[in-house]
Image: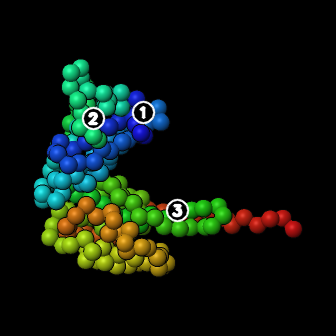
Amino acid sequence: RYLRENDLFLHADIHGAPATILVTQGKEPSIEDIEDAGVLAACYSRAWKANYSYIEVYWVKGSQVSKTPPAGECLAKGAFMVYGERNYLRVPLIIGIGLKVFCDDIYGDYVKLIVGKPDVVKKISVSYVTIIPGQIEPGDLARDIHRLLVKGAYEKTGVKYSINEQHIRDLLPGFSRILDYGEGEGEWKCSCLLYTSPS
């Protein structure tokens, strides 16, 4: 539904993986953008639950993807065909979860959870956690991640941000363990001013 001809379609090379779309808005994506999208395609695939270290992810243009099968064949519900040459990335199963500060002209600063390639998450977040496949149940790990993100953000900004633990739980690909955590390099001092109407 969301895929356009010039967008990129990414998929882990394993049965049981989500389709991932890199929306290009007509621009040429950088290899860094493709790799970041590849991390999402890899980490939210069945490879995480199988405790893989790496997985191949392929990407193609949106114009190469179709729900129309070749003549004389049929597709199962939810299946698709990929035509033409595929481009492959070897992606490590490691993902970053970060707390990013956003600035709003009306409401001031607020935070959101972000996920992606660990170095990207670290660069734009005020605090971050890096996880890999492991043995800790998502509910238990979400509590630890919540504590580390709030603590790291407080040590950097002096503000105790409120985040939803269930949201963290929803972002976890499966049983995992924490590899690294700390303060990120992201901006947190908002320069925007609250709007006041003239008297």
**Residue corresponding to mark 2:** 80
Of helix, strand and loop, which one carries label 1? loop
Q: Measured along the vertical axis of the image, is residue 2 above or below residue 126?
A: above
Mark 3 burial class by Cα count in 10 Å: few <14, some 14-19, many 20+:
some
Left or right of 108: which side holds 34? Answer: left
Q: CA distance from mark 1 to mark 2?
A: 15 Å
Q: Nearer the viewer, residue 159 or 7?
A: 7
Of helix, strand and loop, which one carries label 3? strand
The kind of residue tagged 3 is Phe
The reply to whether discs 1 and 2 touch (Cβ–Cβ < 8 Å) is: no
Mark 2 burial class by Cα count in 10 Å: few <14, some 14-19, many 20+:
some
Is there any visible trace of residue 20 in the rendered image? yes
Of helix, strand and loop, which one carries label 2? loop
Q: Which x, y percent locates residue 60?
A: 29, 32
Q: Counting residues from the N terminus, which is met first, the one under dot 1 or under dot 2?
A: 1
Q: Nearer the viewer, mark 2 or mark 3?
A: 2
Q: Which x, y percent locates residue 9?
A: 32, 37
**Residue corresponding to mark 1:** 4
Q: Counting residues from the N terminus, which is met first, the one under dot 2 or under dot 3?
A: 2
Q: Counting residues from the N terminus, which is met first, the one under dot 1 or under dot 3?
A: 1
Res. 194 image quadrant: bottom right
Is there any visible trace of residue 156 in the rendered image? no
Question: Which residue occupies the extreme right position in the image?
Answer: 199
The kind of residue tagged 2 is Phe
Q: Residue at x 35, y 68 (%)?
A: 168
Q: Quadrant of the N terminus?
A: top left
Rendered image: mark on residue 102? 3
